[in-house]
Image (tube, rainbow, N blue to C red):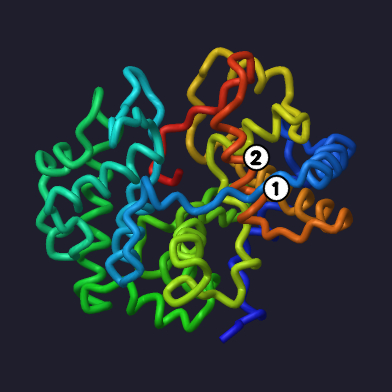
């Protein structure tokens, strides 16, 4: 069932911040040029990567994706965490996706809620083994315990039952995640308001949509109501494209790789203005006859972020479990 009246509030909150931001601005002329260029070149929407994700077309994939996105945050740091999987040396999100898939292939049912709850730090360290250690391992273990326990308490161990409760609505599923799984509750204070950003709570239904090809457990009638996923790479790409402009002070902090505090004004503006810029870019693409969803624009930009030149302004650093 399409629930067009449901909204997460992310889009509205992003606009609220973008219109008041002191450190980040949207260059609308640059945005128009980028939209025209994307439309002319027909920049493709990246396809779902079944090589690095576990995908079997069953409810087991839904549980895997819940685990993946519960742990999908804060990969930066030195020495950098890498995982080698099937001859590929991976980092960041792809290292996480592949390491969880590797665990399943090695016989560990990390998608089983009982296994999630019973996991200890040593075992999770083995699952995520690679070069160096992934940051915030203790936080990831806590998230794994939380989602496993909630699955057992409320959903008979199956995230597919939570998806069924959302009744075909990506927005409703995001709301359910924010309500029932506290680690997905990504909100920040700004100018006396609570700003809803919900990066991981939105990326999970988007991942289901990708993994299941928009059918079955990935069928959502309102997938276009989701926004971009405010992280590190997308604002970096938008700045490279001159769509986002930073104050000299913020630019200098990024060049010096200074850590920005979570919930600080600069960090909230970076994330929220990114979401609103993607909304404007999506609308501009539509004027060129390119009808794409906000999540698809996000995927395009994120893919571009994997191939930025060495002289690109570094992405911001914030140590948080939100993204």
Looking at the rendered structure, the secondary structure element under dot 1 is helix
In the picture shown, does residue 220 fall above or below 283? Answer: below
Residue drawn where x is 77% and y is 29% of the image: 242
> Where does residue 297 sit, x and y in percent of width and height?
67, 50
Query: Residue 311 lies in what quarter of the image?
Result: top right
Q: Element at badge 2?
A: helix
Q: Quadrant of the N terminus?
A: bottom right
- Mark 1 and mark 2: Cα distance apart in space: 6 Å
| Closer to the camera in the image, 191 or 108 | 108
Residue 320, image x and y in percent? 41, 39
Q: What residue do we see at 51% from left, 56% from top? A: 198
First in sequence: mark 1 or mark 2?
1
Q: In the rendered view, would you say 140 is above or below 87?
A: below
Q: Quadrant of the C terminus?
A: top left
**Which residue corresponds to mark 2?**
269
Q: Position of residue 316 (x, y in %)?
A: 55, 28
Q: Residue at x 59, y 77 (%)?
A: 221
Image quadrant assignment for residue 255 = top right
Percent coordinates x, y for residue 278 in the rendering: 71, 48
Q: Which mark is residue 17?
A: 1
Image-based side of 1 in relation to 86, left or right: right
Q: Is residue 31 above or below residue 135?
A: below
For label 2, count other residues whose C-alpha is less than 10 Å away and answer few (under 14), some (14-19) or many (20+).
Answer: many
Q: Nearer the viewer, residue 39 or 162?
A: 39
Residue 109 horizontal side relative to residue 15, left or right: left
CB atoms of marks 1 and 2 within 8 Å: yes
Circle number at residue 277: none
Residue at horizontal 77 percent and vertical 35 percent from the top: 243
Q: In the image, 287: left or right of 153?
A: right
Tell which of 219 and 10 is nearer to you: 219
Name the foreground residue: 274 vs 32: 32
Q: Is residue 275 above or below residue 182?
A: above
């Amino acid at each position: 069932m399409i629930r067009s009246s449901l909204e997460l509030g992310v889009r509205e909150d992003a606009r609220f911040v973008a219109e008041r931001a002191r450190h980040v601005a949207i260059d609308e002329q640059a945005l128009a040029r980028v939209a025209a260029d994307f439309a002319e070149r027909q920049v493709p929407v990246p396809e779902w990567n079944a090589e690095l994700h576990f995908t079997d077309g069953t409810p087991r994939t839904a549980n895997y994706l819940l685990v993946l996105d519960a742990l999908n945050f804060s990969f930066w740091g030195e020495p950098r965490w890498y995982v080698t999987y099937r001859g590929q040396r991976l980092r960041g999100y792809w290292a996480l996706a592949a390491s969880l898939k590797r665990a399943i292939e090695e016989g560990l049912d990390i998608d089983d809620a009982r296994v999630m709850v019973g996991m200890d730090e040593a075992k999770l360290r083995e699952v995520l083994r690679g070069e160096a250690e992934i940051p915030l391992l203790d936080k990831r273990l806590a998230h794994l315990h939380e989602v496993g326990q909630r699955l057992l308490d409320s959903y008979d161990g199956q995230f597919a039952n939570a998806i069924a409760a959302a009744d075909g609505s990506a927005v409703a599923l995001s709301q359910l995640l924010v309500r029932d799984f506290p680690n997905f509750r990504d909100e920040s204070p700004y100018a006396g308001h609570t700003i809803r950003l919900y990066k991981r709570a939105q990326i999970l239904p988007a991942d289901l949509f990708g993994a299941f090809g928009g059918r079955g457990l990935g069928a959502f009638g309102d997938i276009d109501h989701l926004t971009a996923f405010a992280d590190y790479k997308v604002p970096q790409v938008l700045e490279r494209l001159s769509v986002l402009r930073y104050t000299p002070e913020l630019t200098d902090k990024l060049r010096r790789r200074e850590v920005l505090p979570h919930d600080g004004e600069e960090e909230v503006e970076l994330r929220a203005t990114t979401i609103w810029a993607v909304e404007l870019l999506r609308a501009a693409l539509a004027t060129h006859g390119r009808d794409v969803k906000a999540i698809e624009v996000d995927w395009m930009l994120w893919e571009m972020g994997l191939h930025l030149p060495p002289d690109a302004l570094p992405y911001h650093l914030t140590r948080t479990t939100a993204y």
